[in-house]
Image (tube, rainbow, N blue to C red):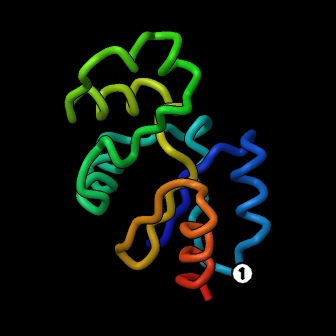
Amino acid sequence: MNRIFYLASCDTCRKIIKMLPENDLVFQDIRQEPITPAQLDEMRNLAGSYEALFSRKAQLYKSKGLKDQNLTEADYRNLILEHYTFLSRPVFIIDSKIYIGNSPKNVAEVIKALS
């Protein structure tokens, strides 16, 4: 099942969603419906690491002093499950391929995959 993990309150996510062609994506607002450990583990299997899914832009990253720590894969996993802002957004899973984040290149690849 093709899915997007996003924040409904995120302007960037909303902008990207408006750019998408008609699709069969299942939308999961991670604030309203938190990511499950099984979903996160599936994302990790597709991405290769939890670190690839982790957002260093989150305000909590700075306020918790995480930039000064050597985080392990287990730390990244626990932090993403602890608070939704640690997930780099949006995350698309389309035909068993993962697309992480909002870079123009990534968005173009998502649009191509959905077309």
The structure residue drawn at horizontal position 55% and vertical position 28%, both measured from the top left corner, is 58
The answer to whether residue 2 is left or right of residue 7 is left
Q: Which image quadrant: the C terminus?
A: bottom right
- Give percent across and percent down for residue 9: 75, 39
Indicate left or right for 51 with 99 as reference.
left
Q: Position of residue 18 (x, y in %)?
A: 79, 66
Residue lying at the far bottom of the rendered structure: 115
90 to the left or right of 98: right
- Vertical side of 27 occupied by 70: above or below: above
Q: Quadrant of residue 74?
A: top left
Which quadrant of the figure contains the N terminus? bottom left
The residue located at (55%, 32%) in the rendering is 57
Rendered view: 84 above or below 17: above
Q: Position of residue 72 (x, y in %)?
A: 20, 29
Quarter of image, res 82: top left
Q: Amino acid at mark 1?
A: Pro
View extreme (top): residue: 64
Q: Identify which residue is drawn at 71% across, 81% down.
A: 22
Q: Secondary structure at mark 1?
A: loop
- Residue for badge 1: 21
Q: Residues within 10 Å of mark 1 (few under 14, many from 20)?
A: few
Judge whether 93 appears above or below 55 on screen: below
86 relative to 29, above or below:
above
Q: Residue at the spot x=57%, y=65% of the render? A: 26
From the top left corner, tell me how far across and down residue 34 is, in percent: 49, 37
Q: Quadrant of residue 103?
A: bottom right
